[in-house]
Amino acid sequence: MSGVLGDYLNWATQLERALRGVVANATKLDLRSLRGLVFLGMGGSGVVGDILGRHVEDVVTLPTITVKSFSLPRYVDRNWLAVAVSYSGNTLETLGAFQEAVRRGVVVAAVASGGELIEISRKLRVPYVKVDEGYLPRTALPALLAGTSKLLEELLGVRLGIEECVDVLRDRTALDVAEKLAHFLVGGVPIFVVPDRIYPLGLRAKNEFNENAKIVSKVEVLPELGHNDIVGWEGSPREWVRFVVFRDMNDQLLDFAASYIKELGYPVMTVDIGKSSYIQTVLYGSWIVGMASTILAKLRGIDPRETISISRYKEVVRRYFKSLGS
Ligand code: PA5
């Protein structure tokens, strides 16, 4: 199958290919001297930091943050590692934060399919991975995850095991689940409920439905949901809302949320996405929402590729930067 859905269906192959990629200018860092790891990136590239950050924290004792803006927090200094991820390599927020990191003497590395980020990394001789071109940034998630994890494996001397995700992306039932989810969401606004341990999946789901299906969406995170939004849902309009609960394991809080929301009168669909590890679960769930949002776009007669509003926004940012330079 070709097109955007075809790109999602091919994720296992995309991941396998990206795992064979090479890290340029690789150098091993002394883990003991590192204070933290900061990912820089926006949208479909920024979510790589959200997803991998939690995984890295499970493997090494290193705090991780993701910066989705033009500049870095003050505490990021030369004892930090900054990894910029931008599929195009030309996103100005990411480039701005990357250049600031270079000026501060932060240890830097990059992942992109080309653009300025690769050019600068070559010039500075800093570690980088160039992933395959030709995808939409959001459909390139396996390549970006594999490239970034290879980079970190080399620099930190750790094993992140992304290769273990290939098999879950071969699950033949995933497309049926995605179809069901897409049909459930027709005519409504998706509200994704996730436990905090897989929050990056909720974020990814929201972004995928925003960009592919052009629909507003929201993420609810447990346990925080039980302390505020749960009350908000008591008095909100029922007609346009569809709740999707991502269930990764037996969890009484998730089951309570699903049944209570139903009791309040909202349509609820529970999607079982649990696999044997955090990274497998999040990548599998990301695969389901990628396909489902593309199918929903088709059902709504919308082109999943086009993101006119993002282009308009990027043009304004570009003009703003140009005006600062002149
Ligand atoms: O998925 C998308 O198309 C966007 O969210 C982009 O990822 C975002 O605009 C950032 O661009 P890039 O991934 O090229 O850095």
Image (spheres, rainbow, N blue to C red):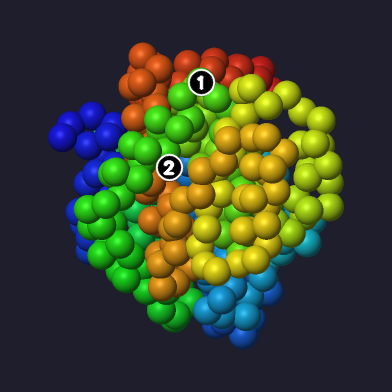
Picture residue at 25% right of the left edge, 39% below the top: 7
Residue 215 lies, in percent from the top left, at: 53, 24
Q: Earlier in the sequence, mark 2 or mark 1?
A: 1
Is residue 290 visible in the rendered structure shown here? no
The relative height of residue 287 versus residue 83 in the rendered view (above or below) is above
Instruction: Please tell me which residue lies in front, 170 or 255.
Output: 255
Residue 292 lies, in percent from the top left, at: 38, 37
Q: Quadrant of residue 139?
A: top left
Q: Residues within 10 Å of mark 1 (few under 14, many from 20)?
A: few
Picture residue at 68% right of the left edge, 74% below the top: 35
Q: Amino acid at mark 2?
A: Val
Picture residue at 58% right of the left edge, 35% below the top: 267
Picture residue at 45% right of the left edge, 57% below the top: 272
Q: Which residue is mark 1?
A: 187
Hey, which residue is sitting farthest bottom in the picture? 32
316 to the left or right of 225: left
Q: Secondary structure at mark 1?
A: loop
Residue 55 lies, in percent from the top left, at: 52, 69
Label 1 lies in ligand 1 vicinity (Cβ under 8 Å): no
